[in-house]
Image (tube, rainbow, N blue to C red):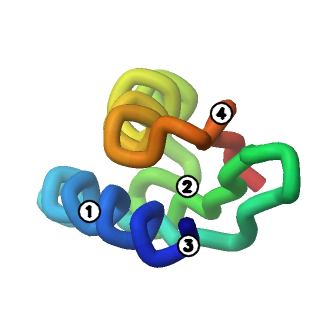
Amino acid sequence: MRERVEQALAKVRPALQADGGDVELVEITDDGVVRVRLQGACKGCPMAQKTLKHGVERIVMREVPEVQRVEAV
């Protein structure tokens, strides 16, 4: 599952990098929670939570259906 989550994040990464940010996979819990760390401009951005839910989480859950949610750490 980790490889598929990484592949999904790779699809999101270019958009984040275009705005000076990035995302790093921290862990995947046994109950399907993906924990990521927003980096660069995304780290302190007021829109980070929206980016996480409507961008990162949407794509990861579409690509890896067994993921329950995505959280920032």
Residue type pointed to by label 3: Arg
Residue type pointed to by label 1: Arg
Q: Which residue does the numbered mark 4 point to in the structure image?
A: 69
- The CA distance from mark 2 to mark 4 is 19 Å
Which of the two residues, 29 or 66, is positioned nearer the viewer here? 66
- The CA distance from mark 4 to mark 1 is 18 Å
Residue type pointed to by label 4: Arg
- The CA distance from mark 4 to mark 3 is 14 Å
Q: Is residue 46 left or right of residue 8?
A: right
Check the image and name the residue furthest to the bottom: 3
What secondary structure is marked by label 1?
helix
What secondary structure is marked by label 2?
loop
Q: Is residue 23 left or right of residue 71?
A: left
- The CA distance from mark 1 to mark 3 is 16 Å
Are the residues flagged by discs 4 and 3 in contact, CB closer than 8 Å?
A: no
Picture quarter with the N terminus: bottom right
Mark 4 crowd level (few <14, some 14–19, many ≥20, 10 Å Cα): some
Q: Which mark is residue 2?
A: 3
Mark 4 vs mark 3, foreground winner is 3
Q: Which residue does the numbered mark 1 point to in the structure image?
A: 13
Q: Earlier in the sequence, mark 2 or mark 4?
A: 2
Q: Earlier in the sequence, mark 2 or mark 3?
A: 3
Residue at position x 67%, y 52% from top? 34
Mark 3 crowd level (few <14, some 14–19, many ≥20, 10 Å Cα): few
Residue at position x 34%, y 45% from top? 63
Are the residues flagged by discs 2 and 3 in contact, CB closer than 8 Å?
A: no
